[in-house]
Image (cartoon, rainbow, N blue to C red):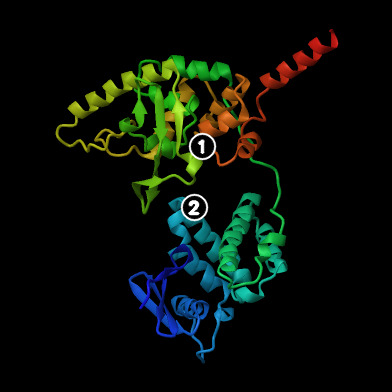
Amino acid sequence: MTKGLRNANGLGHTYKVGNSYKTVIRRNGKVFTATAPTQKDSRHRAMLKAEGITAASTNATLESIILENFLLSWLENEHRHNIAHSTYLRYRSLAIHHINPVIGKIKISELSSRDISETLSSMRSNGQSVRSMQQARALLSICLGEAENLEYIALNPVKKVKNPQGKSKAFTPLTLDEIKRLLNTFEGTYLAARLHIALLCGLRQGEALGLRWSDIDLVNGTLEVKDQIQIVNKKPVFTSLKTERSRRTVILTPDTIAALQRHFNFVEQLKKHGLGNWSELDLVFPSEDGTPRSPKTDYDQWQNALKLCGIGPRRLHDARHSAATLMYASGVGIEVISRALGHSTSAITSRLYVHAAEQPLRNAAELIQQRLKL
């Protein structure tokens, strides 16, 4: 037996056995095997078994696989390991409730762009948001793109379907005066560092709650965003970030460094009062016993801080938007802001976050006026 060949995306191993090829796929503690004259046929037959497809003859091919079987199996066994748990749950819900009821029984080899469009139209008719439709299209695009790469289908039909368009959800950034009011009001308190991380550094909630002291260099004024806290099966767990650019270095302002230095002392006091019940996880923003802080508690503290400062309710994510808008209004370039926020592309930063900043536009108007007077 020769050395095994690893198939794409964890779809088992294929080995040369005599004049044939043998593929072995392991999923959920079960082993599926198939032998065929060619490597491709061996892999295809093993996939048939792994997908739960039964056939009357040994000549069955992957053309027998219907979408709902392929989609759910691929999502469960392959793609869920590449995405955040919350994204996996969202995709699974879309597949079960919106995609499979419409086109799930169609063979993947027979899917057309019209089928994809009808699915999205059905979602729209059922009152689903544009964002949900976009996510459903993205799920199908990735799934069927994998089927195309593995030569299970000739062409990904999603490529010919336009991404649904609609009005973007409005963001409401805090004004410069409101940001100053929050930071000044809570300066020297336990909440100060959390506000700095949200309003000036722009970390997502999960990134902030997963932040460890080992990620922070107070001497050089840097912060490494490496992991995040997510709720999985109702329990907080550390998970990796979605993209390579999400893992990033943030440069801290002197005031943020000072706030974190004071916050370190607050956490040390919490440990002393833990009465032996402290769970040492090195968290910057722990709960009273050292375990990860509840996202709900974190959100409630944010809302209480806004109320105390006479500021209307805002989503916690609006603090991240405020950080981006503040940087843009201060003359920071889009690419730098994109790196600071951990966006996959600067186009996302431009589209989502900087449209509300007036100062750069005023500066542009002043430059035009000055030019006209020359």
**Left or right of residue 326, residue 235 in this image:** left
Q: Which label is found at residue 323?
A: none
Q: Position of residue 47 (x, y in %)?
A: 48, 76
Furthest residue in direction bottom, as rendered: 57
Q: Residue at x 40, y 33 (%)?
A: 224
Q: Is residue 163 visible?
A: yes
From the image, state whether disc 2 or disc 1 is nearer to you. 1
The reply, left or right, for residue 121 in relation to residue 136 is right
Q: Tell me: 183 left or right of 152.
A: left
Q: Which mark is residue 87?
A: 2
Q: Local crowd at mark 2 within 10 Å, few (<14), some, or many (≥20)?
A: some
Q: Earlier in the sequence, mark 2 or mark 1?
A: 2
Q: Say which quadrant the C terminus sits in.
A: top right
Q: SS at mark 2?
A: helix
Amino acid of disc 2: Thr
For the residue labelled by badge 1, is the local secondary structure a helix, a strand or a loop? Answer: loop
Residue count near mark 1 (Cα–Cα under 10 Å), binned few <14, some 14–19, many ≥20: many
Rendered residue at 60%/31% (across/down): 335
Residue type at mark 1: give it.
Gly
Residue position marked by numbered label 1 in the rendering: 342
For the N terminus, which image quadrant?
bottom left
